[in-house]
Amino acid sequence: DSGVTQTPKHLITATGQRVTLRCSPRSGDLSVYWYQQSLDQGLQFLIQYYNGEERAKGNILERFSAQQFPDLHSELNLSSLELGDSALYFCASSSGGSGQPQHFGDGTRLSIL
Amino acid sequence: DAKTTQPPSMDCAEGRAANLPCNHSTISGNEYVYWYRQIHSQGPQYIIHGLKNNETNEMASLIITEDRKSSTLILPHATLRDTAVYYCIVRVAGNTGNQFYFGTGTSLTVIP
């Protein structure tokens, strides 16, 4: 158990809809990262937050957004969903200290019908 | 960030040591080497990381060459549950954490 909690585990929805994925980091971790893993691609970094502030952006679409709340949990919002958004979405957290590793949650499997 | 090169696949007999190589010839002095593994579609599992010195924990050992251009992850007694994709990542350590860029990794199959 990594200590990172993601909900829901599975999500099925239709094209054009909007969903919110939630992540609770490990106790004490200030950084949260979001990754996407599609069937035909590896893990792709989307975005990072540190103590409520956006720190880095990767391959995140404009239809996607995220935020980190004062209690440090984070939400990834996906809107105008397309079939190609079907993927596993992982959240990771780290303390933010120099060199500290990330610890990943079990992911949310999103299926677009 | 330095790029890494890993063999796409490896086999290892159960009970034997699994030695997974990683080449990171362009690594810079302040980049750490991290190893993760992913079993099926589970979240990547942190294994070990290091900067210059060899490291060991309850899961594995990490051997980094003196010039830091390559490293080897050693699973001392591989079991069937070690079958997974193993990722070697190098990343500059930042004050606010790091984003990782995963390559294609090495698919390790432990054979009974």
Image (cartoon, grey):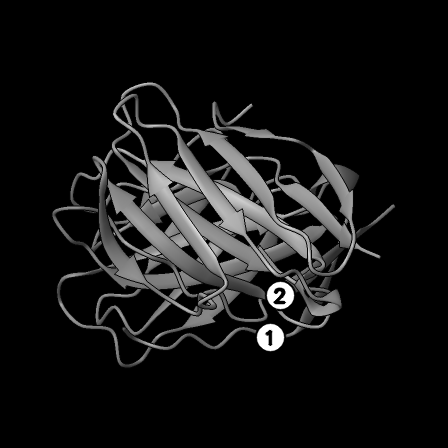
Mark number, residue B7: 1
Mark 2 or mark 1: which comes first in sequence? 1
Badge 1 amino acid: Pro
Measured as percent of width and height from the top left, residue A34 is found at: 45, 49
When the figure is inspected, residue B35 is found, relative to residue A72, above or below; the finding is below
Measured as percent of width and height from the top left, residue A29 is found at: 29, 28
Residue extending farthest bottom: B26
Q: Quadrant of residue B65?
A: bottom left
- Residues at marks 2 and 1 touching, judged by CB atoms closer than 8 Å: yes
Badge 2 amino acid: Thr
Determine the chain carrying the residue at label 1: B
Please give left or right for residue B4 compared with residue A16 in the image.
Answer: left
Determine the chain carrying the residue at label 2: B
When the figure is inspected, residue B48 is found, relative to residue B29, above or below; the finding is above
Measured as percent of width and height from the top left, residue A103 is found at: 43, 37
Residue A64, can we see it? yes
> How far apart, in angstroms, are the residues tagged by discs 2 and 1?
6 Å
Mark number, residue B106: 2
**In terms of depth relative to the viewer, which is nearer, A53 or B44?**
A53
Residue at the spot x=17%, y=72% of the render?
A: B28
